[in-house]
Image: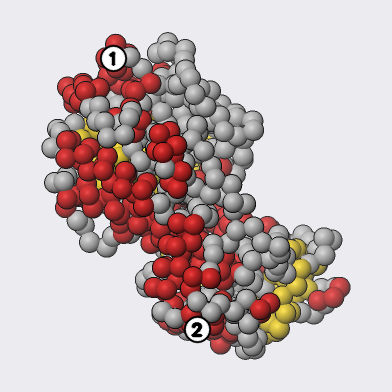
């Protein structure tokens, strides 16, 4: 999405015209027309200006094959338009009506065990099914032709949370076609998959099946390719419908709602296909780490859109209902979650859903208008958010500048989590999250980057765990270090090539020269851990209480790099654990073990200092008071208090809080759960 297209400009124009988007999924088909009128009046009261309509309305529009019941939708769209509420109109293809599966069982997905799923829930479609795709195309075409010019419709929303996987016969056909396009010949596939192992050699593409239930371990490259194919197949479904909507004359932006670091869809390949990135976020209020962890997701969304603003398409105003134990959120917490998204680049904040359902599987999922009605703290909180967002309209379209990048790729994640490796306890997302939290607690902004991203200009590039490193990535990291960046590589990185085949020689083969260190073996660490000792010349390492490694450690040797920490006893006694190779103004750091949180914090703090990274206040990055989140969007400094106690934070200069109008000078008080949005007070 590197160029700003006309539909993207249409999104920016909508926000410029109406202010930051605020609203949610609106499912009028669950209610009578009298309720719709009340809905619109209450939306107006709450400051709602954007609703997503029709996500699950396929059976309403097409109750029997070929029918088109538009009357109710005409009325709803007209009502919303009269009420001044913009519509994100959904192509309702996420959940086909029961008749489709009953008449055409081949449209139903088949799971890994060969079980065909049935209607009665939702999402029961196979992305590979030609019949499903014909029906989805037909209803989308008719919908788009009917409403492309409707004045209420300001955005299009395709499907819902694409993430289906099918292992059936149609998927087998599509998988083979995908493989043929990727490899060109069966010989090339056999090489890439390493099928000499266990007598897996294929004589022809039509022998290949999706990874269904097998007697023992699946070929890891087959598994990786099936994940790649599944993501691409869903993307093809999305693209097909997007093009249909465009061909019908729609000029509005088109999107589909992402799901953060979702395990089944490689959003790096999806990002260019949506006009505006949108995402569903459900941080667990029970997790103390939720604010930092959701910040990482929000940074990913901004990064997927090349730094452009994005849409928080769904979140919960209070409790979800799909966890085992669903803690409610206070209105203050819900407000803070929304403002956090705005601070990290969202130009619209929406919920699932507007009115709480009385029937169906999500009857206990919170909604902006709860069962209790408008006389409720939840709804009063919603109204307060509507007011708050109006006050922040000046941030619309602005970005978050980051000096730090964190490398993440879906293929690497997928390949790195295949079973049968030194330890299943080393998890990509756990490592990325652990490293990211160290940035978050220092108020340091980060972009998430892929192997294909331009790394120029970042002062620090973190590679917490990238199982696959290609020659191009290795070259980009080398160039970045030579240009003065500090690159930090975590354990068990650069292990494999893009076919998930292990690179032979001392590891990480392609980064060895850059790091000035390499290892000959990766090993799981016994549960008691492996004690570490920091070199006494390494300032940041001095004074650490009892440093240790867990989970995985490499038998690492310095080859030109200086050793910052070593294993101090046991099997690995004397073996290097952390190394640094200085290169001009930059350096290549290697962490050859999963080091404990205190040591990781000391290390990353040291890296940021060496790289001259500044925090949201414009100061050298240091640890902020516990629970304070600081992020600068455009020229607004957002300070969020996630702790239970009030904070008094020094902020140089005079500022105005956009949310309260308070003037601050030198310091600012923030009550627990509160948010400040400070803009410099100009005296001229
Ligand atoms: C997802 C879906 C919604 C709803 C919510 C509930 O985000 O897109 O339809 O099921 O979860 O949290």
Query: In which quadrant of the rendered view does residue 99 lie?
Result: top left
Q: Is residue 672 above or below residue 605?
A: above
In this picture, residue 96 sits left or right of residue 528: left
Q: Which residue is drawn at 30% across and 38% down?
A: 90
- Farthest right residue? 570
Image x and y of residue 26, in percent: 34, 27
Return the residue nearer the eye: 593 or 236. Answer: 236
Colour basis: secondary structure
Q: In this view, does 41 lie to the left or right of 209?
A: left
Residue position marked by numbered label 1 in the rendering? 33
Whole-Å distance between the Cαs marked 1 and 2?
A: 62 Å
Residue 187 is labelled as 2
Say which element carries label 2: helix
Element assignment for label 1: helix
Up-down relation of residue 494 to residue 465 (above or below): below
Q: Position of residue 48 (x, y in %)?
A: 30, 26
Q: How crowded is mark 2: few (under 14 residues within 10 Å), some or many (20 or more)?
A: some
Residue at 27% over, 63% down: 2
Beta carbon of the mark 1 residue lies under 8 A of ligand 1: no
Q: Mark 1 or mark 2: which comes first in sequence?
A: 1
Examine the image and state in which quarter residue 575 appears. Answer: bottom right
Whether residue 660 sits left or right of residue 250 in the image: it is right
**Badge 1, how many Cα within 10 Å: few under 14, some, many 20+?**
some
Which residue is rendered at x = 29% and y = 53% of the image?
Answer: 240
Q: Which quadrant of the rendered structure holds the N terminus?
A: bottom left
Q: Residue 74 carries which label?
A: none
User: Do we see residue 462 in this rendering?
Assistant: no
Q: Nearer the viewer, residue 529 or 266?
A: 266
Report the quarter where the C terminus lies. Answer: top left
The front one of 644 and 197 is 197
Eyeballing the image, is 387 above or below 405?
above
**x, y percent for residue 511:** 55, 82
């Amino acid at each position: 999405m590197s160029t700003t297209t006309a539909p993207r400009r249409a999104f920016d124009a909508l926000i410029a015209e109406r202010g930051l988007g605020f609203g949610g999924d609106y499912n009028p088909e669950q209610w009578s027309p009298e309720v719709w009128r009340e809905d619109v009046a209450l939306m107006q009261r709450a400051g709602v200006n954007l609703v997503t309509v029709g996500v699950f309305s396929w059976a309403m529009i097409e109750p029997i094959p070929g029918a088109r019941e538009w009357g109710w939708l005409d009325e709803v769209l007209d009502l919303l338009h009269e009420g001044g509420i913009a519509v994100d109109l959904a192509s309702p293809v996420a959940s086909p009506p029961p008749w489709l599966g009953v008449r055409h069982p081949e449209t139903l997905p088949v799971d890994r065990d060969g079980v065909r799923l049935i209607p009665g829930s939702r999402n029961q479609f196979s992305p590979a099914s030609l019949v499903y795709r014909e029906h989805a195309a037909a209803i989308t075409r008719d919908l788009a032709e009917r409403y492309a010019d409707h004045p209420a419709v300001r955005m299009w929303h395709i499907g819902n949370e694409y993430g289906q996987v099918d292992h059936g016969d149609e998927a087998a056909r599509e998988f083979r076609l995908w493989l043929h396009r990727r490899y060109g010949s069966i010989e090339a596939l056999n090489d890439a998959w390493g099928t000499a192992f266990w007598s897996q050699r294929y004589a022809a593409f039509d022998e290949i099946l999706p990874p269904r239930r097998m007697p023992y371990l699946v070929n890891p490259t087959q598994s990786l390719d099936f994940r790649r194919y599944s993501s691409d197949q869903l993307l093809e479904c999305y693209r097909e419908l997007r093009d249909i909507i465009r061909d019908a004359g729609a000029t509005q932006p088109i999107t589909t709602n992402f799901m953060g670091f979702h395990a089944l869809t490689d959003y790096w390949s999806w990002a260019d296909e949506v006009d505006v990135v949108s995402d569903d976020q459900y941080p667990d209020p029970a997790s103390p780490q939720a604010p930092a962890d959701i910040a990482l997701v929000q940074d990913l969304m901004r990064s997927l859109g090349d730094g452009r603003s994005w849409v928080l398409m769904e979140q919960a105003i209070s409790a979800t209902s799909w966890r085992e134990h669903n803690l409610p959120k206070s209105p203050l917490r819900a407000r803070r979650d929304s403002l956090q998204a705005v601070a990290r680049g969202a130009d619209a904040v929406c919920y699932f859903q507007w009115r709480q359902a009385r029937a169906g599987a999500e009857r206990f999922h919170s909604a902006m208008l709860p069962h209790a009605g408008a006389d409720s703290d939840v709804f009063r909180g919603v109204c307060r958010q509507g007011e708050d967002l109006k006050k922040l309209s000046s941030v619309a379209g602005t970005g978050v500048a980051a000096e730090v990048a964190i490398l993440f790729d879906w293929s690497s994640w997928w390949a790195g989590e295949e079973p049968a490796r030194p330890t299943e306890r080393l998890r990509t997302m756990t490592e990325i999250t652990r490293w990211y939290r160290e940035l978050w607690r220092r108020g340091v902004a980060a972009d998430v980057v892929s192997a294909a991203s331009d790394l120029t200009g970042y002062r620090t590039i973190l590679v917490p765990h990238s199982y696959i490193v290609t020659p191009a990535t290795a070259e980009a990291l080398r160039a970045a270090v030579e240009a003065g960046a500090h690159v930090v590589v975590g354990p068990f990185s650069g292990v494999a090539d893009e076919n998930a085949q292990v690179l032979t020689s001392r590891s990480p083969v392609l980064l060895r020269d850059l790091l000035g260190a390499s290892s000959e073996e990766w090993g799981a660490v016994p549960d008691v851990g492996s004690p570490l000792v920091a070199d006494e010349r390494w300032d940041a390492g001095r004074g650490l209480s009892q440093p240790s490694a867990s989970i995985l450690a490499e038998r690492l040797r310095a080859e030109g790099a200086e050793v910052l920490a070593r294993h101090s006893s046991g099997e690995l006694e004397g073996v290097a654990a952390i190394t640094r190779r200085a290169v001009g103004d930059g350096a290549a750091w290697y962490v050859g073990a999963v080091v404990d949180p205190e040591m990781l914090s000391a290390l990353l703090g040291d890296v940021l200092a060496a790289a001259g990274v500044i925090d949201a206040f414009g100061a050298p990055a240091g640890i902020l008071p516990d629970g304070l989140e600081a992020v600068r969007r455009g020229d607004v400094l957002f300070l969020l208090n996630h702790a239970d106690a009030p904070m008094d934070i020094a902020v140089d200069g005079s500022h105005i809080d956009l949310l309260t109008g308070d003037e601050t000078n030198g310091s600012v008080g923030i009550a627990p759960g509160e948010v400040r949005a400070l803009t410099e007070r100009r005296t001229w």
